[in-house]
Amino acid sequence: MNKKEYKNEEIYRRRIEHLFESVNLEKARSWFEDFQQLMAYYRCAIMEIETKFNVLNEEFSLEHDRNPINGMKSRLKSPISIKEKLDRKNLDTDISTIEQELNDIAGIRVICSFPDDVYMLADALLKQDDITLIEKKDYIKNPKPNGYRSLHLIVSVPIFLAKEKRNMKVEIQLRTIAQDFWASLEHQLRYKKDTNFTDEMANELLYCANLSAELDEKMDTLRKHTFENDHSL
Ligand code: 0O2
């Protein structure tokens, strides 16, 4: 190592030392452990809700010979997205703040076959006596101006641990296959890096959203014809 390299190395070392001096490692470790634990609780809550929907799907398919649920996806919000959301809302990073203020750390998307299935499944879930509805946004009856359609529920569900019961919040998005197709592609197009999202593109997407709503209506009519003898469908 020559003199200049040695000096740069020394500067780098001092910078790193300075950075770590300002961090209370014990505090950071304890925060991280609590965060990991909270995320584990949310994973349990996701499992609870998924099981409830699987049971409803199973029961319906036995009784009516078709599945109202086409698929389910779940996700835990990433630490980076959690931090970004806290910053946007001007909130601190306390574990209790994260749990109290953010409703969408645990998320489940339920993709339904037909529009009526969305409401049938939402009603069946909300009727269960361990589920509490915290918030409901019906973007199917009232689509967003860009055409987005989906039924959003924030619910609280208990998870049973060895020594305690905890109520955890889960965001549930219920939508049809057509609504999910539109939302997934719209998300990809809107958030594509280095692309200028023009008004014209937004109008085209709105047109496509309306087309997919029409498609849902037509498929629903077909369902009614196909199952016309089964009045519960
Ligand atoms: P991600 O990665 O999907 O979680 P809030 O969460 O209440 O502060 P907001 O916007 O009032 O924010 O919540 P809202 O309206 O219930 O929507 C939250 C989620 O719905 C979004 O999560 C998306 O998943 C979905 N969503 C809402 N609007 C649109 C839309 O126009 N297009 C698409 N494709 N999805 C939408 P995040 O946090 O954006 O991300």
Image (cartoon, grey):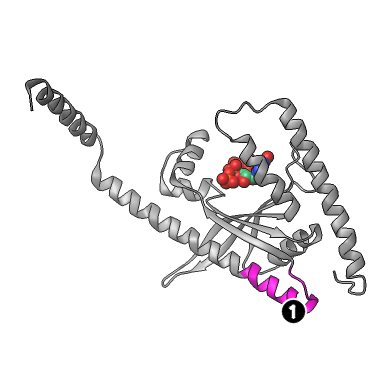
225 relative to 93 in the view: left or right? right
- SS state under label 1: helix
Residue drawn at x 7%, y 21% is: 3
Residue type highlighted by circle 1? Leu
Quadrant of the rendered image holding ligand 1? top right
Q: Quadrant of the C terminus?
A: bottom right
Quadrant of residue 176 within the rendered picture: bottom right
Q: What stretch is highlighted in magenta?
A: 52-67
Q: In which quarter of the image is the N terminus?
A: top left
Residue drawn at x 63%, y 41% is: 187
Question: Foreground residue, 177 or 34?
Answer: 177
User: Residue 138 colored magenta?
Assistant: no
39 relative to 72 in the view: left or right? left
Where's residue 98, x and y in %? 47, 47
Dominant secondary structure, magenta: helix
Question: Which residue, as the protein is rendered here, is positioned at the far front?
Answer: 1
Residue drawn at x 80%, y 47% is: 212
Question: Foreground residue, 99 or 198?
Answer: 198
The residue indicated by pointer 1 is 62
Where's residue 78, x and y in %? 47, 47
Quadrant of residue 145 within the rendered picture: top right
Where's residue 91, x and y in %? 47, 37
- Badge 1: how crowded within 10 Å, few (<14), some, or many (20+)? few
Q: Can residue 145 be seen in this view?
A: no
Residue drawn at x 78%, y 76% is: 65
